[in-house]
Amino acid sequence: MRAYILRRLLMFVPVLMAASVLIFALMRVLPGDVAVMILVGPGGEGQASPEALAKLRADLGLDQPLFVQYVAWLKDVVQLNLGTSYASSRTVVTELSQRLPITVELAFLAIIMTMLIAVPAGVVSAIRQNTWLDYLLRVVSVAGLTIPTFFTATLLILWLVTSFRWLPPIELVGLFNNPVENLTQLIWPAVMLAFYHGAVISRMTRSQMLEVLRQDYVRTAWAKGLEERLVVVRHALQNALLPVVTIAGLEFGVLLGGTVVMETIFVLPGVGSYIVESIRARDYPVLQAIILMMALSYLVINLVVDLCYAWLDPRIRYA
């Protein structure tokens, strides 16, 4: 197991380096001049002389060759210096320390709801195959996969506004200041995220359960007259959960980076909305830091999933 963990950790470095090069390159191909946007403004309402633009580019290091800019950025990242925002002049670490907890809390809330609802739904759908309950759950899961989340989220807000006079929060209350109020504000975007990601988990759980339920050892358990609960939970579900764990880990990684739409629709000041603001302002330090952080979190989640997989099925670590 130790060799397996070490081998997986060693894969971190080349993957993270490749991700950093890709992130840096993508930021530099974005249209628009950062210096012009800062001095003139995104709407073009201001004016700036060529001398002022040249001085600002030199101050930001944008007049240097791309390789020099990349090495300087990478050196700062290694020293845990993520830079300073062009738009707010505050350090990226300070901005993220205020926004990251909101996104992480929303992602955790969504993945908990996803697992609590989707796994039982997939199990019930499998053991009640081709019944009205199975058809109903399959229709709901297909709807979750096919209907865009921004559309369902908009419908949800309209329903909440017209029926309950509920409005998206103007200012988000902190979890430790008022947990009840905080959960009230985050529950609906989490429901929308769980609606989509739960559909993926539910369909995966159903297909895996159907495959396991057809195995000989499960038939033997049925033939011995064991209770349905014991056969399903002890004999079938444990083996069916192996690929579900993998998909759940990947879905959590997607959640961390995919809350942009929900945070924008529900006016939540998390990392997702911060990305949108930074793209508009061509705020390179912020975008590079956030995307690199998401890539790192995705790698860590994948590592944890692989370790869980190897723990559940020891044959994998020797493959």
Image (cartoon, rainbow, N blue to C red):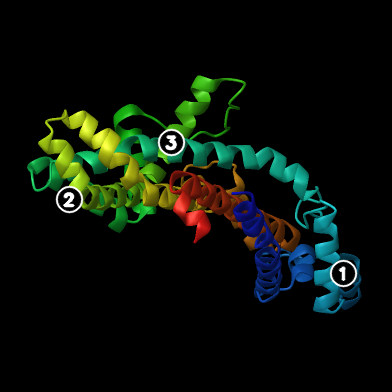
What's the mark number on residue 214? 2
Q: Secondary structure at mark 3?
A: helix
Q: Secondary structure at mark 1?
A: loop
Quarter of the view holding residue 22: bottom right
> Does residue 239 appear in the picture of this structure?
yes
Q: Is residue 298 above or below residue 38?
A: above
Give the camera-side residue of 2 and 14.
2
Quarter of the view holding residue 146: bottom left
Q: Earlier in the sequence, mark 2 or mark 1?
A: 1
**How many other residues sit within 10 Å of disc 2, few (<14), some (14-19) or many (≥20)?**
few
Q: Nearer the viewer, mark 2 or mark 1?
A: 2
Could you say where residue 239 lies in the image, as x and y percent from the top left? 33, 45
Q: Secondary structure at mark 2?
A: loop
Name the residue at 36% across, 34% down: 116
**Left or right side of 318 for 135:** left
Could you say where residue 124 lies in the image, as x and y percent from the top left? 20, 39
- Residue type, mark 2 in image: Arg
Q: Nearer the viewer, mark 3 or mark 1?
A: 3
Quarter of the view holding residue 45: bottom right
Q: Which residue is mark 3?
A: 112
